[in-house]
Image (cartoon, grey):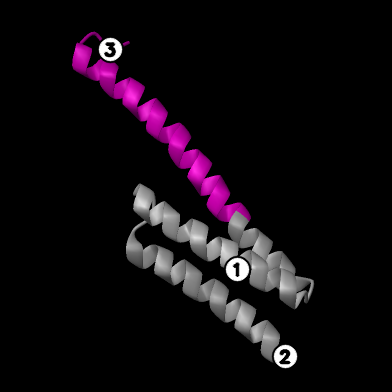
Amino acid sequence: MAHHKSTIKRIRQTKKRTERNRYYRTRLKNISKAVRKAVEDNDRDEALKAFKVANKRIHAMVSKGFLKKRTASRKVSRLNILVNSMQVA
C-alpha cells in the first residue's frame, strides 16, 4: 500500500479514470455494433438513424477528451462507408 499522500491521490485518480474510460469504451463499442447490426439486417432506415447517433456521440467523446479528433473521424468514416455500401447494394 502507498504511504505518500501524492501516491494515494494518484491511485484514487487512476480508479476514477479507469471507470470513466471503461464506460466510454463500452459505449463506443455498442454504438458501432448498433450500426453494424442494422447494416447486417439490411435495414436502411435503422442504419441511417444509428449512424446519425453514432456520429454525434463519437464526436462528443472527442470534446470530452476520450478520443482524439482523427481517431473519431476515422471511426465515423468507416461506419459511413459501411452504411453507404449497404445503400448501393
Which callout, 1 or 3, points at the residue further toward the start of the chain? 3
Which callout, 2 or 1, points at the residue further toward the start of the chain? 1
What kind of residue is marked 3? Ala
Q: Which residue is mark 2?
A: 89
What kind of residue is marked 1? Phe
Crowding at dot 1, Cα within 10 Å, few <14 / some 14-19 / many 20+, comes out as: many
Find residue 84 and report its image quarter: bottom right
Find residue 82 and report its image quarter: bottom right
Q: Which residue is mark 1?
A: 51
Question: In the rendered image, which quarter contains the C terminus?
Answer: bottom right
| Point 56% across, 80% down: residue | 81
Crowding at dot 2, Cα within 10 Å, few <14 / some 14-19 / many 20+, comes out as: few
Magenta stretch contains residue 26: yes
Q: Is residue 32 left or right of residue 2?
A: right
What kind of residue is marked 2? Ala
Residue 66, horizontal then vertical, whole percent? 38, 49
Q: Marks 2 and 3, how far apart in space?
A: 59 Å
Question: In the rendered image, which quarter contains the N terminus?
Answer: top left
Magenta stretch contains residue 71: no
